[in-house]
Image: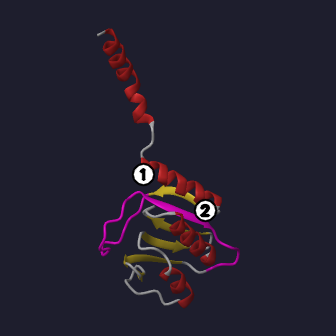
């Protein structure tokens, strides 16, 4: 009887420690984020205002991966992936730049948005997939930077 009492008290004391352990999803996200950092990208949770015409639900805040652009790049654009492989700008027009479209075609369907301005290029992603998906994303950002 005393043994069971001691075991139950220890279990009661140690059970909150199990809550501190990250879940499998959190561990996978942290691994992807560390690998992204090694590849030269920065991640932040950024609040997003998605266009009303987007068919799929995108989170807000959304994980945004970005990196600096090279000097002299003056093009600015923003595209949303409405359906897998269909990239539209804010006026719902498809991407007209063949160089950009070639890169966008290689991105996974878990990418919601890609945006470039004169200083940085950013990509909103659901963080679903393995390191091969992250490799494709890093390659796309490097190509378009």
Circle number at residue 41: 2
As helix, strand or loop, the secondary structure at mark 1 comes to: helix
Query: In percent of the image, x 30 and y 75: which residue is there?
Result: 53
| Percent position of residue 39, x then y | 64, 63
Circle number at residue 25: 1
From the viewer's perspective, is 54 left or right of 127? left
Q: How many marks?
A: 2
* Range of magenta residues: 47-74
> CB under 8 Å between callouts 2 and 1?
no
Q: Overall secondary structure of the magenta stretch?
A: loop
2 over 60 or under it: above or below? above
64 over 31 or under it: above or below? below
Find residue 92 and report its image quarter: bottom left
Bin the neighbour count of mark 1 within 10 Å (Cα to Cα): few under 14, some 14-19, many 20 and up: few
| Percent position of residue 37, x then y | 61, 57
| Percent position of residue 131, x then y | 54, 63
CA distance for labels 2 and 1: 21 Å
Find residue 120 and report its image quarter: bottom right
Q: Is residue 48 magenta?
A: yes
From the viewer's perspective, is 141 left or right of 25? right
Query: In percent of the image, x 40 and y 35: which residue is there?
Result: 19
* Foreground of the two, 48 or 21: 21
* Foreground of the two, 26 or 72: 26
Bin the neighbour count of mark 2 within 10 Å (Cα to Cα): few under 14, some 14-19, many 20 and up: many
Q: Is residue 49 magenta?
A: yes
Which is more foreground, mark 2 or mark 1? Answer: 1
| The C terminus sits in image quarter | bottom right
Query: In percent of the image, x 40 and y 87: which residue is there?
Result: 93
| Percent position of residue 68, x then y | 64, 67
Q: For the view shown, which residue lies furthest in the right direction?
A: 71
As helix, strand or loop, the secondary structure at mark 2 comes to: loop
């Amino acid at each position: 009887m005393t043994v069971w009492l001691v075991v139950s008290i220890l279990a009661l004391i140690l059970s909150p420690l199990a809550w501190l352990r990250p879940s499998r999803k959190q561990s996978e996200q942290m691994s992807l984020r560390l690998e992204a950092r090694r590849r030269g990208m920065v991640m932040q949770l950024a609040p997003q205002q998605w266009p009303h015409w987007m068919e799929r639900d995108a989170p807000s805040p959304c994980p945004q991966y970005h990196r600096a652009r090279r000097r002299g790049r003056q093009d600015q654009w923003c595209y949303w992936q409405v359906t897998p492989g269909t990239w539209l700008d804010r006026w719902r027009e498809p991407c007209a730049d063949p160089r950009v479209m070639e890169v966008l075609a290689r991105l996974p369907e878990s990418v919601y948005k890609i945006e470039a301005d004169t200083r940085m290029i950013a990509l909103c992603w659901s963080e679903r997939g393995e390191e091969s998906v992250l490799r494709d994303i890093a390659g796309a950002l490097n190509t378009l930077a």
